[in-house]
Image (cartoon, rainbow, N blue to C red):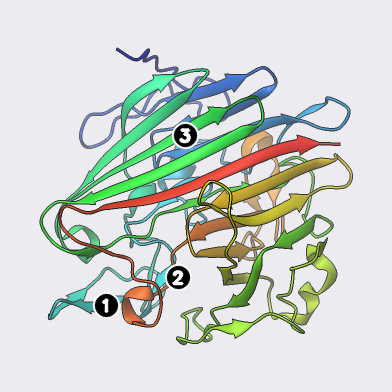
Amino acid sequence: MPKISIMFWCFLLLPLVFYRSQANQKVGIFELKKLDFSVKLTNYGATMLSVVLPDKNGKLDDVVLAFESLKDYSNDSVYFGAIVGRVANRIGSAQFSLNGVHYKLVANEGKNTLHGGLKGFSDVVWTVKSYIEDSHITFTYNSLDGEQGFPGDLVVSVTYMLIETNKLAIKMEAKALNKATPVNLAHHTYWNLHGHNSGDILSHHLQLFGSNITPVNDQLIPIGEIAPVKGTPYDFLEPQEIGSKINELPDGYDINYVLDPSSYKNLRKAVVLRDSVSGRKLELWTNMPGLQFYTSNKLNNVKGKDGFVYKKHAAVCLETQGFPDAVNHPNFPSQVVKPGETYLHVMVYRFTAA
């Protein structure tokens, strides 16, 4: 039997001893730790709460944004650290047709569906299936037919794994039981490699291995085209500061990149992110075709952990994914999972400092 231990949050980050879901499950905090590398998570939304890493001088900092209280997570509109789904990102007009059946979803961003609807996977209590502190934790969730308008029963699991002393892998799986359904899970952590309470990320250097994007309309819904980044503010094929061209955009970056093929154990290299002050570097590989690059444009004086107030551009999200609104664009890679099939989404982070 795997070792299972639940440490209820009794300090500032989640001051309540525990919170019971409608299913009478307890929400807890769980730590994965190897030497100076530690990750804290909760089964509320299968959410990542902190990542503590040394800088080039050995100083430890928490490099992800998070809330201070459980109440804030239950009313979250920014998806700090959560697993989002059943379909991450946006579905235009909150509807789609599949196998001759028209499905109307729950709209939660104007007339569109964002990150699974009003109560997506980020707002449910997951079950802890297995937990070994220096190795991994697995959360599971059973999504029912008709949940937020999506068809079919879906069994979902997310595993966070520490590999060596500087790698974090995330494996998201989903199995459709009785109906074909779109599935597009994403990990929605906000990164600031200088420290979650250090200000903005505009001086971070980013290299993003995507030669194309999927352009969007004024509601951030893809128009169905694939366009090159060359000669545009979206070109990060060579490393450069995130803030170098951000003023050429109306609000900041919030766009899906089409990742270029590469080979690392069948994964694509997606991103290299570096903070020159701390020396910390994040590298990310994935098996997904897309990545949403988001510069936290909608953060507006959000009170976070340790009492710090997060402002616009306080972090960057690097959400590997299928293409947004793919269920309404036949030319995009399909996200439909048929009964008996298994959806698999892998992310591998490597952290260094120099």
Which quadrant of the view contains residue 119?
Answer: bottom left
Q: Relative to the observer, which residue lies in front, 339 or 92? A: 339
Does any portion of residue 321 appear in the rendered image? yes
Q: Say the numbered circle drawn on residue 160.
A: 3
Does any portion of residue 93 appear in the rendered image? no
Counting from the top left corner in percent of width and height, residue 245 is at 81, 74
Q: Secondary structure at mark 1?
A: strand
Quarter of the figure that contains the C terminus = top right
In the image, residue 169 above or below residue 112: above
The three-letter amino acid code for the residue at tag 1 is Gln
Q: Say the numbered circle drawn on residue 158.
A: none
Q: Earlier in the sequence, mark 3 or mark 1?
A: 1
Q: Secondary structure at mark 3?
A: strand
Mark 3–mark 1 Cα distance, whole angstroms, equals 32 Å
Counting from the top left corner in percent of width and height, residue 15 is at 50, 26
In the image, residue 109 above or below residue 117: below
The three-letter amino acid code for the residue at tag 2 is Phe
Mark 2–mark 3 Cα distance, whole angstroms, equals 23 Å
Proximity of marks 2 and 1: CB atoms separated by less than 8 Å: no
Which quadrant of the view contains residue 212?
Answer: bottom right
In the image, residue 202 above or below residue 76: below
Mark 2–mark 1 Cα distance, whole angstroms, equals 16 Å
Residue position for label 1: 95
Which quadrant of the view contains residue 46?
Answer: top left
Q: Secondary structure at mark 2?
A: loop
Q: Say the numbered circle drawn on residue 323.
A: 2
Counting from the top left corner in percent of width and height, residue 62 is at 69, 34
Residue at point 49%, 18% (across, down): 133
